[in-house]
Amino acid sequence: MMRSIILIAVLFAFVGCQETAQKTPDANTKKPTAVASGAEIYKTKCAMCHGADGNLGIGGAKKLTESQLDLAALKTQIKKGKGTMPPFETQLSAEEIDAVADFVMGLRK
Ligand code: HEC
């Protein structure tokens, strides 16, 4: 008896999961804001050292407006950090790193 109750509970949990899995793509297409925008990520994770416009340069940081890094190198630096800049690969998802890298590219003149 106990066994079949557990079986039913597991079955319900499984069906519940499948329902949310089916709803997710739909919810995502309707709400693209689920991933924070590059500008928001920059404001919360980067601006304290680099400044709102990329020119603050705390701790010897280069002006992001004058950075020569290409997009791939930029993403690597965000992921791995450098010198006093912390690595962000454990704090940000790949999508968030892409978004903030695009934003930083846009700070250049
Ligand atoms: C704790 C302060 C700090 C934070 C937070 C920080 N950085 Fe940095 N950043 C630095 C420092 C210092 C350097 C210079 C590292 C070096 O070259 O030794 C740097 C360098 C960089 C560079 C390289 C510029 C170049 O051309 O060499 C980029 C790009 C960059 N940061 C982007 C970001 C982004 C994007 C974020 C947020 C996700 C961020 N940083 C968060 C301090 C910080």
Image (cartoon, rainbow, N blue to C red):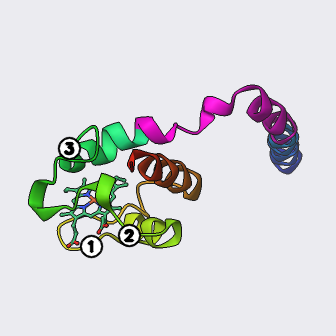
Mark 3, residue position: 48
In the image, what residue occupies the spot 61% across and 34% down?
A: 34
Label number found at residue 47: none
Give me the C-alpha separation between circle 2 and circle 1. Answer: 6 Å
Spot occupied by residue 21 in the image (x, y as percentages of width and height): 82, 42
Mark 2, residue position: 77
In the image, what residue occupies the spot 38% across and 60% down?
A: 88
Tell me: is circle 3 under 8 Å from ligand 1. Answer: yes
In the image, what residue occupies the spot 19% across and 73% down?
A: 83
Please name the amino acid that badge 1 sits on: Lys
In the image, what residue occupies the spot 48% across and 55% down?
A: 101
Which element carries disc 3, helix, strand or loop?
Answer: helix
Which element carries disc 2, helix, strand or loop?
Answer: helix
Looking at the image, which is closer to me, 78 or 108?
A: 108
Helix, strand or loop: magenta stretch = helix
Return the disc, 2 or 1, that comes first in the chain's sequence. Answer: 2
Please name the amino acid that badge 3 sits on: Met
Tell me: is circle 2 under 8 Å from ligand 1. Answer: yes
Spot occupied by residue 67 in the image (x, y as percentages of width and height): 33, 63
Looking at the image, which is closer to me, 8 or 103?
A: 103
Quadrant field for ligand 1 = bottom left
